[in-house]
Image: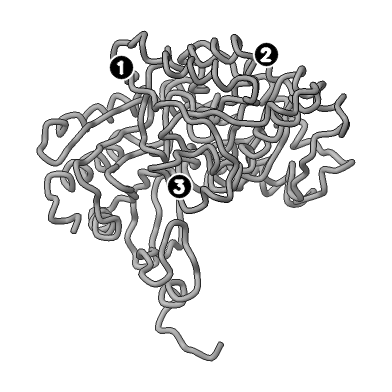
Amino acid sequence: MNKKYTSDIEFDQQHIWHPYTSMTQPLPAYKVVKANGVRITLESGEQLIDGMASWWSVVHGYNHQAINRAMHQQIDQVSHVMFGGLTHQPAIDLCRKLVAMTPANLDKVFLADSGSVAVEVAIKMAIQYWHSKGKAQKNTLMTVKGGYHGDTFAAMSVCDPVNGMHQLFQGFMAKSVFAPQPKSQFHQCWDHAETEELEQLFAQHHQHLAAFIIEPIVQGAGGMRFYHPEYLKQCRLLCDKYDVLLIADEIATGFGRTGKLFAFEHAEISPDILCLGKALTGGYLTLAATLCTKAIADTISSGDAGVFMHGPTFMGNPLACSAANASLSLLAENQWQTQIIDIETCLQDLKSIANHDNVADVRVLGAIGVVETKQSVNTAAIQAHFVKMGVWIRPFGKLIYIMPPYVISKNDLQQLIDAVKQVVQYPDIWN
């Protein structure tokens, strides 16, 4: 490669494929040289208040001394070792914490690489469970429209089939059953007729259903919608009635984001399989976990295969586990409940623009603030404007949303909120 480039950014645009970005018309990528607390420093000198927590994972802020210290100590011991036939203290400590902080029925932990892989693992667990019980015909998944569970193939098969990001792969994916999207909103009255069609689908398909998978309370990347806890409670009851496993995808919502440690707690239920990721390591390294019941693990282990058929190379990575242990300790030490309440209180200010001509809806839950506009925004243009305002907010479609680190100050959060309010009132910025 003999071509010379005027800058690293030019090379980046020519050769590095960023997520959800065209290579012929790439979105701008801003070069980061440092990050500390809630601020991201660009090579050009700007310091940006992070409103995204790096896709909702950096809950304790960047460059946190406690997580740094844990990883420094671990890297001098062992950074990685295969998990097949070997174990280590960071993984043991992490799984002990996860078992202690999740419902009592979830006492088996499978460590994975990422959120998408955790969902793949959950789906494979469900299918292998029924196969081991002699019911191999129960190999179909059911979910609700408007959901998002990741970009790998099994995960894509349970994402929204029409308005999601994966329509062009439909011919290659397993066929799932899709129920209507939940309509009753979190803060509104519950409509008892809401689950009538859902139950009809359970009754029609249950003999072939391995599991029902859903994002508890918050449909994240599929539209940032908050639905009523009673809907999730009814899902649990229907799964029990029709002998279907319930998978809770808490990749985005787990570890306090909605005001509960896990979003399914709003409905006072427990899933059969639970997927965790994102904030698990405080945003330091990729790591995920899939937890299941003893009944599921024992049934799989007593089946024809005798083992669960999955084994990631970097499963249980010690360095990632050490970061996760430090992150989970910080959750308790920092009193995450108080942090979330303070953030939610500040985010209510977004509702002051709810009646603006450009706004379709404003919704707030825990440390999530969403402004839904009436028309899609130009991501590149609006993001450039946010950078000029000293904030990092990455909208998509019609959604301009804030999901900041839990450690953000009221002043910094207010600057994020003011930036959103200003941009919404000047739609010429979007074009």
Please determine whether, in this image, residue 430 is positioned above or below residue 281: below
For discs 1 and 2, the disc positioned in front in the rendered view: 1
Q: Residue at x 35, y 43 (%)?
A: 51
At label 1, the amino acid type is His
Q: Position of residue 5 (x, y in %)?
A: 44, 84
The residue identified by callout 1 is 187
Is tag 3's residue or tag 1's residue first in the polypeptide sequence? 3
The residue identified by callout 2 is 104
Q: Residue at x 76, y 17 (%)?
A: 295
For disc 1, the neighbor class at 10 Å (few under 14, some 14 to 19, many from 20) is: few
Q: Residue at x 81, y 26 (%)?
A: 132
Q: Position of residue 332 (x, y in %)?
A: 55, 24
For the C terminus, the image quarter is: bottom left
Front residue of this view, candidates 341 and 355: 355
Give the farthest residue toward the bottom. 2
Is tag 2's residue or tag 3's residue first in the polypeptide sequence? 3
Horizontal side of residue 183 vs 96, given as left or right: left
For the N terminus, the image quarter is: bottom right
Q: How many marks?
A: 3
